[in-house]
Amino acid sequence: MLIKNSKLFILILLLLIIALAGFFRLYGLETIPPGIYPDEAINANQAISEPGKIFYPENNGREGLFINLIALSFSVFGISIWSFKIVSAIIGILTVLGLYLLTRELFFQYTKSRFRCIALLSSFFLATSFWHINFSRIGFRAILVPLILTFSFYLLFYGFRTKKTWAFILAGIAFGLGFHTYIAFRLAVLIIPVILLFYWFIYKRQNLQKQFFLFVFCFLFFVFIIAAPIGFYFLENPENFMSRSTGISIFSQPEPIKELGKSLIVHLAMFNIAGDYNWRHNVSGSPVLFWPVGILFLIGIFYSIRQCLISLKKRNWPLFGSHSEIIGYWLLITWWFIMILPGILTYEGIPHCLRCIGAIPPTFIFVGIGGEFLYRNIKKIFKRDSLLYRLMGLVPVLLVICFVFLQFNKYFNLWARNPEVANAFSKECVEIGDYLNSLPKETQKYVIINESGPNLPLPVQSIIFIQRTENKDKETKYIFENDIAKIKTDNKKTIIVLMSYDEKIVNQLKIVFPEGELEEKNKIWSYKPNE
């Protein structure tokens, strides 16, 4: 038996998995990934300067929940890279716990050893998944989507099984919060009718229709109450509702059907064949699932589809019991497909594993189903009193140890140390910020912006945030290259930093400050007018 029935043993295993998830998400958090991407930095900067908003229209529009959680972290821990990234890390760790609880609930009708095995395997593979680890260490609001969906569905299923009204209230609150996370979450509303349809049949068979409607009302009422603020915001500001998604939609292309087919194929292939090519999201081009995990995923998804087809063939719907694991299979298939649609319905940067982040929980439940199915069937080959049967208990332990080391090496060595990753996270902007922080307070500091964009271009956000970690952002003036003549040294020591080397700007500086000196230090170009 893969998983013993002892509650203490299960608790110890679960705590070890959560500790492992914590290690992968917290180790070297301040320096890995190397740099702060501008899309992250603007979240941090607005958490400092404009906390409390429902929606932030800048940078293509962002829901406010994540930014406000960052603001809370800054108020507790102070402003730093660590206190910024700890928000995503904690969300990621809690998602691992939530996945265990959800998986147990989905397959509650199985034997204890079996549903515990699936739940532990699912949470273990999520804890060590590059896909989830990576986004748990980046300041993107999308990391909230797996957490919200996992706990929403756990509470909803738990409520229907135990008939606890409070569970529906909490499920409604959780699901309502999802509308304050990331635009892809909105498609999750398509999953809810599938769940309610199944439970309508269950409750109708038990003559509990009134109770069903009460529970559904509690759930939907609190979804509406929690989602209402952002809904009213969009009613007043309809231009922000779709944000950037309209521009990257397949429907904006001349041949949308062709683009849909292409996007569907590459997104289905990203799990096992070729994944996201963006170094910020993935080891460029590699499948989002490590190949052994990818095999378990395929086993799990095909096994789930098979169970659903059998239920249709035999008309074995959940009409015949108070709770059935078949609902779990239907949920997982529906959930997985709907939450990869945000990627499938776009043409830019595909496959795009960030847009598909809501599919992470069902993906790893499929992996858990595949792992339990494979182990259970392999053990049937050997006789119970044979040595090989006894050794089968050690095999998973050895595989787990090897797997953890391989995943550690993939993220912290092969990926994190790759120069492409430093470029993807604008490490040079962080280094400029550190350089400016190192200069004496009395030094006049200028940064010449030779990047395009309205007001302060996005790359500047990374520099500003790094300066804010030491409360030095107000010491630096940011100017565009056309305003170089306006720089006043006032006979004080002055440093003019270039965001990137540009010979045209250097020549302008030499004309305005002919006695100055150009200096390059650690790939940071600066001009000293007073030298």
Image (cartoon, rainbow, N blue to C red):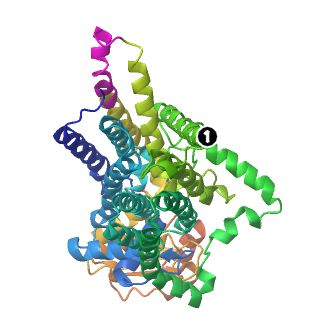
- Looking at the image, residue 235 sits to the left or right of residue 253; the answer is left
Q: Quadrant of residue 269?
A: top right
Compare residues 520 and 249 and report the one nearer the observer: 249
Residue at 59% x, 52% y: name it: 337
| Image quadrant containing the N terminus | top left
Give the quadrant of residue 461: bottom left
For the point 16% across and 41% down, the residue is: 8
Location of residue 524 in the rendering, given as x and y in whole percent from the top left corner? 43, 62
Q: Main secondary structure of the magenta part?
A: helix
Reading the image, the residue beneath label 1 is 309
Query: Is 185 positioned to the left or the right of 82 in the image?
Result: right
The residue located at (60%, 75%) in the rendering is 243
Q: Is residue 78 left or right of residue 252?
A: left
Closest to the observer, 466 or 335: 335
Please provide the residue range marked out in magenta: 383-400
- Is any atom of residue 478 visible in this view? yes
Percent coordinates x, y for residue 51 in the rendering: 36, 82
206 to 246, vertically: above or below: above
Secondary structure beneath disc 1?
helix
Magenta stretch encompasses residue 393: yes
> Does 194 appear above or below 217?
above
User: Which amino acid, by three-letter code, is at mark 1?
Assistant: Leu
Q: Quadrant of the C terminus?
A: bottom left
Q: Residue furthest top?
A: 386
